[in-house]
């Protein structure tokens, strides 16, 4: 049985009608919609990826139950979960559903989605400019929305029969701000992104990431020859364009800290 999170600080805000067991574990949670929010787990020394090793988040958290519960809860709140093709490749057997990461509370996650008038599962949205995807990935076999360029769409062709393919632009890169607008046009006003770091960087640079949930794991990952990324990659913000945030909540569970920040605020 998972023990409740200890609430060290909570600035308050919108509160979704969480089922009693979810509220008892986490406390209040909600969003001002429309919203794009991210979720990451990081080592104490700022590592969020482990080279080409699959399921880096699970390794960094040690599959800690409280982290997996929060991952499931944040997915349960979302209309859609947005990931880059690199994240899809790095997690070859994953499904981006609440029950996949915390099956013990699958019924409560489903009840929350019904209360919020969401679909049975959050829609997986995969970003790929090139259209290079493994059609056998179980998440694509189950059905997803793939957002790509016109060239990427031609490469995909009919290889993803369970997926709908959305074209955004004709260049070699995707405009993430345009992607968010396209998804909003489908009625998906509550978007969760689980990265990876380059997608997060693009969303931050475009000022389209509103909040971030960061699990701070009590582990040191280290760096040597292997490339290990931090939470934000591909953009340089400071010293000229730093993005400031406001602390919204701090929760503790065991030796883990669970932080929530609101982005794009004026520096105090």
Image (spheres, rainbow, N blue to C red):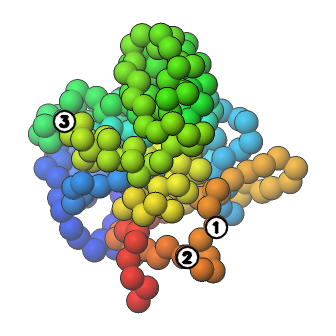
Q: Which residue is mark 1?
A: 236
Sooner in the amino-acid sequence: mark 1 or mark 3? 3
Residue 202 at x, y = what percent?
Answer: 53, 55
Total marks placed? 3
Q: Give the foreground label among 3 and 2.
A: 2
Question: Mark 3–mark 2 contact, CB under 8 Å?
Answer: no
Residue 222 placement, left or right of 262 = right
Q: Which residue is mark 3?
A: 118
Q: Residue furthest bottom?
A: 268
Q: Which residue is depicted at the point 55% across and 27% down?
A: 151
Question: Which of the pair 23/189 is nearer the observer?
Answer: 189
Query: Vertical placement of 52 versus 131: above or below?
Result: below
Q: Crowding near pointer 1: few (<14 within 10 Å), some, many (20+)?
A: few
Number of the label disc, if any, that sits on residue 241 = 2
Question: Mark 2–mark 1 contact, CB under 8 Å?
Answer: yes
Residue 219 at x, y = what percent?
Answer: 66, 56
Q: Which residue is depicted at the point 69% across and 53% down?
A: 229
Residue 58 at x, y = what percent?
Answer: 58, 40
Question: Which of the pair 120/180 is nearer the observer?
Answer: 180
Observer able to see residue 128: yes
| Inter-mark Cα distance, 1 to 3 | 36 Å
| Inter-mark Cα distance, 2 to 1 | 8 Å
Question: SS for tag 2?
Answer: loop
Q: Crowding near pointer 2: few (<14 within 10 Å), some, many (20+)?
A: few
Question: SS for tag 3?
Answer: loop
Sooner in the amino-acid sequence: mark 2 or mark 1? 1
| Inter-mark Cα distance, 3 to 2 | 36 Å
Quadrant of image for the C terminus:
bottom left
Residue 248 placement, left or right of 94 = left
Residue 178 at x, y = what percent?
Answer: 39, 47
Quadrant of image for the N terminus:
top left
């Amino acid at each position: 049985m998972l023990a409740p999170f200890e609430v060290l600080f909570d600035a308050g805000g919108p509160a979704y009608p969480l089922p009693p067991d979810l509220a008892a574990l986490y406390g209040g949670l909600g969003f001002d919609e429309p919203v794009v929010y991210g979720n990451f787990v990081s080592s104490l020394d700022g590592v969020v990826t482990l080279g080409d090793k699959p399921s880096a988040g699970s390794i960094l958290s040690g599959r800690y139950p409280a982290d997996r519960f929060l991952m499931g809860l944040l997915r349960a709140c979302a209309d859609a979960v947005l990931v880059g093709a690199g994240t899809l490749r790095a997690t070859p057997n994953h499904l981006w559903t609440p029950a996949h990461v915390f099956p013990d509370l699958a019924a409560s996650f489903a009840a929350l989605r019904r209360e919020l008038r969401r679909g049975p599962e959050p829609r997986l949205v995969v970003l790929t400019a090139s259209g290079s995807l493994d059609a056998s990935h179980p998440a694509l076999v189950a059905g997803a929305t793939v957002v790509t360029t016109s060239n990427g769409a031609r490469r995909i062709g009919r290889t993803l029969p369970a997926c709908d393919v959305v074209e955004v632009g004709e260049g070699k890169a995707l405009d993430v701000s345009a992607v968010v607008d396209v998804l909003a046009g489908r009625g998906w006003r509550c978007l969760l992104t689980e990265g990876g770091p380059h997608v997060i960087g693009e969303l931050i640079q475009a000022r389209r990431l509103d909040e971030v949930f960061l699990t701070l794991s009590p582990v040191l990952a280290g760096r040597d020859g292997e490339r290990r990324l931090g939470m934000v990659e591909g953009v340089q913000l400071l010293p000229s364009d730093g993005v400031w945030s406001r602390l919204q909540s701090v929760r503790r569970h065991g030796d883990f800290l669970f932080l929530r920040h609101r982005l794009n605020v004026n520096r105090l």
